[in-house]
Image (cartoon, rainbow, N blue to C red):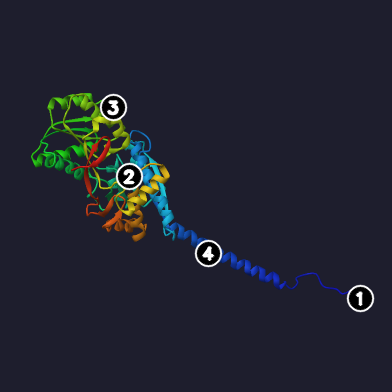
Amino acid sequence: MYNYKPYGRTRPNKLWVISIAIATLISTFGLRYLFGRQQKTAANNFCVGVILPLTGNSAYIGQSVKNGMDIASADYAKQDASKQLHLQLEYSDTGGDAAKVVTAYQSLVNIKNCPSIIAVQEGVKALIPLAEQDKRVLLATSVPDNGITGKNPWVFRFFVSAESDASTMADYAFSKLNLRKGAILYVNNSTGISYRDSFTQKFSKLGGNIIEAQAFNPDDVDFRTQALKIKQAAPDAVYIVGYGKSIANIPIQLREAGVTATFLSMGTISQPEILQAAGEAANGLYYTTAEFATDLNAGTPELKQFVDSYKSRFGTNPVFFEFFGYDSLKLLLLAAKRGGTEPEKLREGMSAIANIPLAVGNVSVGKDGNVQFPIVVRKIVDGKWTPAP
């Protein structure tokens, strides 16, 4: 007789059942872990959109700001061991064209969904109503124009304002240098007009007199016509307002025209390549700037950390705009870590910042949205800056 086992269902092997159960558990909990991890990553993602000129006449300003932000981003990645926030920087180049600023903003907000925008240079005023409408934190840097802040609670500025900067220079010129007759040579855009008006108002209020004001276009390199008119007016001070490498020609052409007045200016003129190009014509020039120093090995640990990191990466010291790029991003990161990345929480975090040590010094955010920090006057001697008396 044959041992016969009918064909059909047989009893499942115990090992096979256990294997299926384990695989199911791993799959279920693995998916839950992965999904939870993705949710956490999305929740902790912090997108910062940056609108700036990386090409065009103002490219050196935009690139300097970007360099500072890149250092801040790298420093943050090293220090934030907990990875509380995943920083995502999104740069958008305007080429210095103010008309492209709104398009860049809309892309960063509507497509990238960035809760905060850092805007550099021209065209920022067009974003003010949009920031309030979309409830996005707008931080302007390297934008000194009057009328940027104080209009709505979503807009902040981390830079010298034309009002405070020009007023400081006017007060120093009148009170310390005993200058009474001023002329202004300014770039014909919102920045130049803001400086012209603020300097005129303060200087006149103190008892001085603006006897000549001449404008030039942002791309101009020949200022001889304006220089001749200023020579004929015979001022004892000329306030130079502009940016871009071509402003090195201004003190040269003023001296060539026979202008012997004391030159006054703003921090943009202190760029090494500008001072080198201006040469002897810039000697004796006074300018206003933020109170930080790299050449004197002085300052806070925050300043030293930035300068060391910057020099290690780029092989040179930061000069001016780099500081504001670095500190602007640091400020947003601080606000986000304290309050969160949701726009309303981020805005509240920005508004609450007070007496925080950064590379430019101790900063606080005023009620009008301006980041407050010390401004000083310096003097150019033999192609280098020195503290003004």
For the residue marked with disc 1, what is the amino acid?
Met
Residue 28, picture quadrant: bottom right
Name the residue: 34% across, 55% down: 343
- Nearest to the eye among marks 4 and 2: give it: 2
366 relative position to 37: left or right = left
Instruction: Please name the residue that numbered disc 1 is placed on.
Output: 1
- Give yes or no for contact between labels 2 and 1 (Cβ–Cβ under 8 Å): no
Name the residue: 45% across, 60% down: 40
- Give yes or no for contact between labels 3 and 1 (Cβ–Cβ under 8 Å): no
For the residue marked with disc 4, what is the amino acid?
Arg
- Nearest to the eye among marks 2 and 1: give it: 2
Instruction: Please name the residue that numbered disc 4 is placed on.
Output: 32
* Residue 113 visible, this angle: no
* Residue 197 visible, this angle: yes
For the residue marked with disc 3, what is the amino acid?
Val
Residue 147 placed where, x, y %? 22, 44
What separation in Å lies between label 3 and label 1 (alpha carbons)? 113 Å
Earlier sequence position, callout 4 versus callout 3: 4
Earlier sequence position, callout 3 versus callout 1: 1
Instruction: Please name the residue that numbered disc 2 is placed on.
Output: 119
Which mark identifies residue 221? Answer: 3
